[in-house]
Image (tube, grey):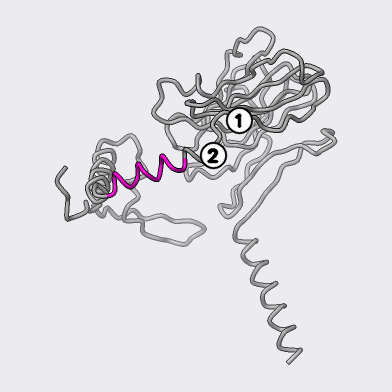
Amino acid sequence: MNQQSTPPTATKDPQDLITHGDKRIDNYYWLRQQDDLKVIDYLKAENSYTDSQMQHTEELQQSLYDEMLSRIEETDLSVPYRLQDYYYYSRTVEGQAYSIFCRKYQSLDADEEILLDQNKLAEGHEYFSLGTLSISPNQQILAYAVDNNGSEQYTLYFLDLATRKLYPEAIADTYYSFAWGNDNQTAFYTKLDDANRPYQLWRHTLGSSPSDDVLVYQEDDESFFLSVGKTRSRAYILLNLGSIVIYNLGYKVRAEVRRQKLEGRR
């Protein structure tokens, strides 16, 4: 491979964006169109340039990779934890890239039940990431979400553990957070806006079409992101809102208080 001396240059295509009455210009807004051939060609050019510039380090890269891999115990087992009548754990197998999630009934000496083998899910995909992984309260249904393109937009599935069959519905464009209703039939999940910000909480009934799902809450303030979870008692479902803006403001306030206290001691 011949080394490219000049990196590719992204074309400027100004796009006016208006939020809360404030206008800003994004010269590279067009790069958001992931399926556009122009964007794909540009990303290929970036990758080609990177490969060209890093060509002289290929031997070192392989050496570092081999050393790090040699220090990893590829066949390993997580610490099991008990949930009602089952012990849950994950394990890895040498030569396989992803964890396998398992459980045993009542005793760690019982036969192993494989709940989800990520290696099988990843077959045939250049990219694979597991998001949500949540067992229903009756421990008979497994909810899990996968991303096969790196967009961090996950598709949510429901697996009947008794029959090993998926429920007919698949819910696209979800995010990490998820919570089961205690009836084992209701699921709460979050969806993303155009900026990949989790901003909606939806309620789904198993076996129904996602088009019938109910919007529980929508956060329109772009400085906040939304998540859902469950209390430790499993009695309540919590909707959480967080903002890096508020966090940074709190940090600045605490820093200013500390500064004033230090000055008062001098």
Q: Which mark is residue 76?
A: 1
Look at label 1 and name its amino acid: Asp
Q: Given the image, on which type of amino acid does mark 2 rest?
A: Leu
Using the rendered view, name the quadrant where residue 45 is placed. top left
Q: Give the image location of residue 1, x and y in percent.
A: 16, 42
- Magenta stretch mostly in which secondary structure? helix
Q: Is residue 120 magenta?
A: no
Highlighted range, magenta = 57-68
Which sits earlier in the primary sequence, circle 2 or circle 1?
1
Residues 229 and 90: in front is: 90
Q: Which percent across, then down, holds residue 244?
A: 60, 58
Residue occupying image coordinates x 72% and y 13%: 111
**What number of labels is visible?**
2
On residue 192, the disc is 2
Determine whether 217 is above or below 101 in the image: below
Q: Where residue 186 sits: x, y (%)?
A: 72, 23
Q: Is residue 237 left or right of residue 216?
A: right
Q: Which residue is situated farthest in the bottom direction here? A: 266
Image position of 52 with respect to 109: above or below: below
Mark 1 residue element: strand
In this rendered view, identify the residue nearer to me: 50 or 155.
50
Q: In the image, what residue occupies the spot 56% across and 25% down? A: 171
Which mark is drawn over residue 245? none
Front position in the image: 139 or 15: 139
State whether residue 166 is above or below residue 3.
above
Q: Residue at x 51, y 26 (%)?
A: 94
| Residue 118, position as x, y percentages in the image | 54, 24
Q: Nearer the viewer, residue 100 or 127?
A: 100
Instruction: Measure the alpha-carbon separation of dots 2 and 1.
Output: 35 Å
